[in-house]
Amino acid sequence: MNVRKLILGLLDMAVKVAFVVFVVVLISRYSKVAYNYGYRIFNQIPVSSGTGRTVTVTISASDSASDIAEKLSSAGLITDKMLFRLQEKFSDYQGLETPGVYELSTAMTTEEMLQIMAAGSSEVSGTDTAAKESADENSSSSDSGEEETTGETNAGEESNGG
């Protein structure tokens, strides 16, 4: 009976050690994958260097980021569709892609392609841009008023302290 407990104890410990090793290997492997994706999202590398190859791509109004990724991938402009969708999501151009025909190069980064595809969006919503600029000017003037008030308070505190 004592030998049986010893064998079961050793077997139990071996299973626990194997489980811990398995978990450590999984964490190590997937942390490398996650790091690689994160690095590639923010450190964009074009498909080719130099002048590259120019490709014509047509984006329609109903195209989502996934549809655009599929078109760019089939045209040879990107290598990873999931990476493109993540780069689009984290870029300043998320959802701003406008329908049209674009001349894109394999030497362009994803950010450059998105910038070109979103270039028409500020022209399309010119009234929104003007409204945003006037709102920014109003907030700037109210901010400067707060700074003047703060400046007067600080000047009064300095004269009291000295």
Image (cartoon, rainbow, N blue to C red):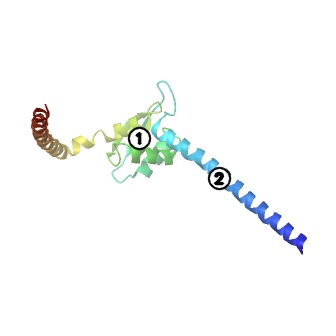
Look at the picture and state if 80 lies above or below 159: below
**Label 2 secondary element:** helix
Look at the picture and state if 30 lies above or below 57: below
**Tag shown at residue 133:** none
Is residue 74 visible in the rendered structure shown here?
Answer: no
**Label 1 secondary element:** strand
Label 2, label 1: how many angstroms apart (C-alpha)? 40 Å
Image quarter of the N terminus: bottom right
Residue holding disc 2: 26
Q: Mark 2, mark 1: which one is toward the viewer?
A: 2
Residue located at (77% from left, 62% from top): 13
Q: Are marks 2 and 1 in contact (CB under 8 Å)?
A: no
Residue 24 in the image, given as x and y percentages of width and height: 66, 52
Residue 63 in the image, given as x and y percentages of width and height: 38, 52
Look at the picture and state if 5 lies above or below 103: below
Image quarter of the C terminus: top left
Amino acid type, callout 1: Val
Residue holding disc 1: 57
> Badge 1: how crowded within 10 Å, few (<14), some, or many (20+)?
some
Residue 29 in the image, given as x and y percentages of width and height: 64, 48
Amino acid type, callout 2: Leu
Q: Which of the 4 image quadrants contains residue 93?
A: top left
Look at the picture and state if 28 lies above or below 39: below
Is residue 88 visible in the rendered structure shown here?
Answer: yes
Residue located at (44% from left, 51% from top): 66
Residue located at (45% from left, 47% from top): 86
Residue 82 in the image, given as x and y percentages of width and height: 50, 48
Q: Nearer the viewer, residue 109 or 11?
A: 11
